[in-house]
Image: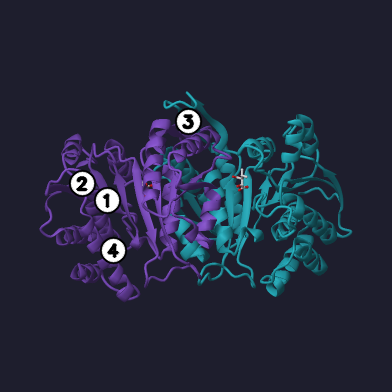
Chain colours: A cyan, B purple
């Protein structure tokens, strides 16, 4: 952000399950890393399964308006087994991503020293997935007829626009310029010929403006193979909403678990606040036990700081996390232990 | 198949790239394994990039009719860099799957002794993906408006019917009864709520008829993680066309390479011939060098034999492949060497 302000309002949405357990640590890391460089005022939002089950509300307009007035959002996780699949995900998480036009879903994958990857010979893994965040199959443009009968037909529609694709493609090339200057478009253009062809044409066109950046293409099925047997080939992976969802979870697995993977849902023109969250879900199976790893949430606080322009503060969190993982990554620790260990290094 | 005939006509479609190099070995394995139990007449079809580039034909009606008259199809691979992505895939491979109503795309994944998995501790891997083959995003129901302009909109439509889903769900539960009696539905029902909800309802309903079979559900993103860090949890994975495409390539990678993965595109009511093919593609990067591994193609011949009711002959191929991999899997061999080594054991 270009403004030189030092006062920021942060919306905090812990959400469901382990989201509630890890978010406070992200908040503390933010606070400590920023030090005197910035003052954060936190606005807590009671959104998620509890609120929905209590009074039927998912994301009231009023809350959305207040969130729009903040500078950034820290989110935990959304989803609860007591609520039908999709209700909270679409009504809260995706609604925020869409309403705040967070068209870049940024998901770095890095194999930290001290983490045991499930891969035998992982090599160096350090890539970023730039996932489109406001289009594709996530639009909610589908329906069903004759529901519950043997003649039921259910559709899901992927909507892709040149406008929506071009802006995220540009973001990916800009990002590549700051990295190893390589973009890999991932799609399934041999089957999804309409959307795939448009993505490829726009990548080719934008790519011409970045002569220093090389770009290639992988079908999504082939990309899942490369993530397992040759992940170091990737620098910036550029892909659509659904493929990005799938590839980043697989990527999380190859770098030793989604517990280390943070993400930013970014409105890159700062028209609305951007949102930072671990890529893991609410993990109902381990919620409430105090054993969730807060590292990804803490790393998302670093992404938030970097987004607001506090690169040094962000780097302090990243360094603390790296040091923590290198020294203690293989030990079994509670949420609070990991949180305290990382905080003590910031 | 219930008929007790011994004369079969097999359509052979080597297709493109390494498809042409591996298919002859599949044919020889078929021949040798069947011995006197069956007589196969082969009908070769010149379909693929060469034909298309020569005379513009992809799959003429006449050829399709002749293929319909055969008992089964051996296919190599389809796709060529000289032809725009999608043309051959949709015009030939997917057209066959759809026209022959091959609604079960069966893809076993097994970690053979002697194969080095890229996973550090793979455990026992032995599952089958039952991928729906005639619906979903593969229907070709999409389009584009204002193509090439900044106002372009491209859509892809996933069409799912209760009819199409129920028949493949039943197949999966029947298959589970012959295996470890567990079905995992993979979808993304928290986002693709229309299709996902229908799949889940049909699985729940059909599941009631199979009290011995347990079933659970994974989001596709979570499934990509389990394939890497806990693949032995799976027995039968049941999923849609696109997710099946993605998961089976990832599965191929975790079992040491798609070079060992065969598949069957099955019309389970035998209204039309079923088709057997390696899951790998035409691999233009290594085509023409005589180094493609014919194992997957040979295993697809075993699937063909099993489909026609020749279980013993199929088992002979499987055993030969297993023995070959265990003894020589880690050596570097040409296509012909692997082919000969496996044939010598049948
Ligand atoms: C919870 C779900 C809707 C979400 C998604 O699919 O985007 C999650 O998997 C993610 O990756 O952030
Ligand atoms: C070539 C392509 C159309 C095909 C598919 O997507 O089904 C292939 O990837 C496969 O898995 O058989």
**Element under label 1?**
strand
Of callouts 1 and 4, the N-terminal one: 1
* Residue shown at 67% from the left, 36% from the top: A95
The residue labelled by disc 3 is A154
**Element under label 4?**
helix
Mark linked to residue B72: 2
Mark 2 to mark 4 CA distance (whole Å): 19 Å
Q: Are marks 2 and 3 on the same chain?
A: no
Q: Residues within 10 Å of mark 4 (few under 14, many from 20)?
A: many
Mark 3 to mark 1 CA distance (whole Å): 29 Å
- What is the quadrant of the C terminus of chain A in the image? bottom right
Answer yes or no: is residue A132 visible: yes
The residue labelled by disc 4 is B295
What's the chain of the residue with tag 2?
Answer: B
Pointers 2 and 1 in contact (C-beta within 8 Å): yes
Q: Residues within 10 Å of mark 2 (few under 14, many from 20)?
A: many
Of callouts 2 and 4, the N-terminal one: 2
**Element under label 2?**
strand
Q: Residue A33's image quarter?
A: bottom right
Whole-percent x and y of residue A194? 43, 37
Mark 3 to mark 4 CA distance (whole Å): 39 Å
What's the chain of the residue with tag 3?
Answer: A
Mark 2 to mark 1 CA distance (whole Å): 8 Å
**Element under label 3?**
strand
Mark 2 to mark 3 CA distance (whole Å): 32 Å
Give the residue furthest to the front: B211
Mark linked to residue B276: 1
């Amino acid at each position: 952000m270009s403004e030189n302000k030092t006062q920021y309002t942060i919306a905090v949405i812990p959400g469901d399950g382990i989201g509630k357990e890890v978010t406070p640590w992200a908040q503390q890391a933010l606070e400590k890393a920023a030090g005197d460089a910035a003052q954060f005022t936190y606005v807590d939002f009671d959104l998620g399964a509890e609120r929905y089950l209590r009074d039927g509300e998912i994301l009231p307009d009023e809350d959305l308006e207040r969130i729009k007035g903040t500078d950034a959002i820290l989110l935990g996780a959304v989803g609860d087994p007591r609520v039908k699949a999709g209700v909270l995900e679409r009504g809260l998480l995706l609604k925020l991503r869409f309403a705040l036009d967070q068209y870049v879903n940024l998901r770095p994958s890095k194999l930290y020293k001290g983490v045991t990857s499930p891969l035998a010979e992982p090599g160096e893994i350090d890539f970023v997935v730039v996932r489109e965040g406001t289009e594709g199959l996530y639009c909610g443009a589908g329906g069903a007829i004759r529901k519950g009968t043997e003649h039921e037909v259910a559709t899901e529609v992927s909507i892709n626009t040149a406008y929506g694709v071009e802006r995220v493609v540009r973001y990916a090339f800009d990002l590549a310029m700051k990295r190893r200057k390589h973009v890999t478009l991932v799609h399934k253009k041999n089957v999804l010929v309409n959307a795939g062809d448009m993505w490829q044409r726009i990548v080719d066109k934008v790519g011409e403006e970045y002569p220093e950046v090389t770009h290639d293409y992988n079908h999504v099925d082939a990309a899942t193979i490369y993530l397992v047997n040759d992940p170091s080939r990737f620098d910036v992976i550029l892909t659509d909403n659904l493929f990005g969802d799938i590839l980043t979870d697989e990527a999380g697995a190859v770098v030793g678990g989604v517990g280390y993977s943070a993400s930013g849902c970014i409105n890159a023109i700062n028209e609305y606040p951007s949102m930072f969250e671990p890529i893991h879900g609410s993990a109902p199976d381990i919620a409430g036990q105090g054993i969730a790893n807060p590292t990804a949430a803490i790393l998302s606080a670093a992404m938030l700081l970097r987004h607001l322009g506090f690169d040094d503060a962000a780097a302090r969190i990243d360094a603390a996390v790296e040091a923590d993982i290198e020294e203690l990554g293989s030990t079994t620790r509670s949420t609070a232990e990991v949180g305290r260990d990382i905080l003590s290094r910031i």
